[in-house]
Image (cartoon, rainbow, N blue to C red):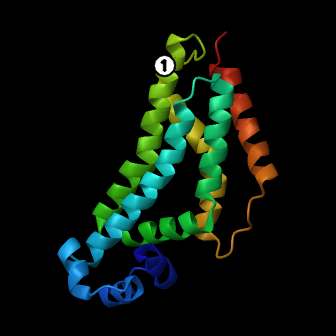
Amino acid sequence: MAEAVFLAQGFAETTMRDVAARAGASKETLYRHFAGKEGLFAEVVSNRARLLRGRLDADLGRPNAMAEILRDLGINLLEAMTSPEVTALLRLVVAEAPRDPAIGRIFYALGPERTRERLTEYLEAARGRGEFGGRDAGLAASIFLGAVTSQCHTSRLVLQDPPPMERAEIEERVDEVVAMFVGHYGAR
């Protein structure tokens, strides 16, 4: 409920009264659970990051070949990052982080940083299986994630109405990134 209100009205325009009305609760109930609007917003960000992370963690937990794992991870990541809900939430986080740095830290730690850490762990394990030949799994994870999301991610942040990405476009982009990644880092 709170996420929908924040996304519809923006952080600055949303009040605890608005969220309480939408949830069918009292303002006092919200204040008992959250210190204020910032705490409620931090919880919204945390919940969305956990939802995204759950999808991505499932990809990395399978025993498939590295190229297949990276492809599924890339597609799920790009689909999530280009969705209207995540785009709107990310815009709110970017707008509010200078005023309330904790919001940015929460989102980053639970979302992008956690994904990078999990991919790093996966690549280190892939090295042990002889599938990954890179020296620095953390750097490789950052390069992979950046290649999958960078241009698409940026356009979502700065364009008013970014064009939607079709599934075929997402798959084509991810397939190219995986091919480059495996070509460079795959076992030789």
The answer to whether residue 138 of the structure is visible from this angle is no
User: Taking 137 as reference, is 168 left or right?
Assistant: right
**Left or right, 148 with reference to 124:** right
Which residue is at a point 23% across and 81% down the rendered structure image? 29
Q: Position of residue 2 (x, y in %)?
A: 40, 76
Q: Quick one: 149 or 25, which is closer to the camera? A: 25
51 displayed left or right of 20: right
Q: Residue at x 68, y 24 (%)?
A: 182
Q: Amino acid at mark 1?
A: Ala
Can you tell which quarter of the image residue 185 is in? top right
Q: Quadrant of the N terminus?
A: bottom left
Residue 183 position, x and y percent, is 71, 22
Numbered disc total: 1
Q: Is residue 112 visible?
A: yes
The image quadrant where one finds the C terminus is: top right
Q: Is residue 1 or residue 114 the one in the foreground?
A: 1
The picture places residue 177, in percent across and down from the top left corner, at 70, 36
Q: Position of residue 108 (x, y in %)?
A: 40, 53
Image height of 162 relative to 57, above or below: below
| Of the pair 110 and 64, the residue shown nearer to us | 64
As drawn, which residue projects farthest toward the front? 24
Per the image, label 1 sits on a secondary structure element best described as helix
Q: Which residue is mark 1?
A: 125
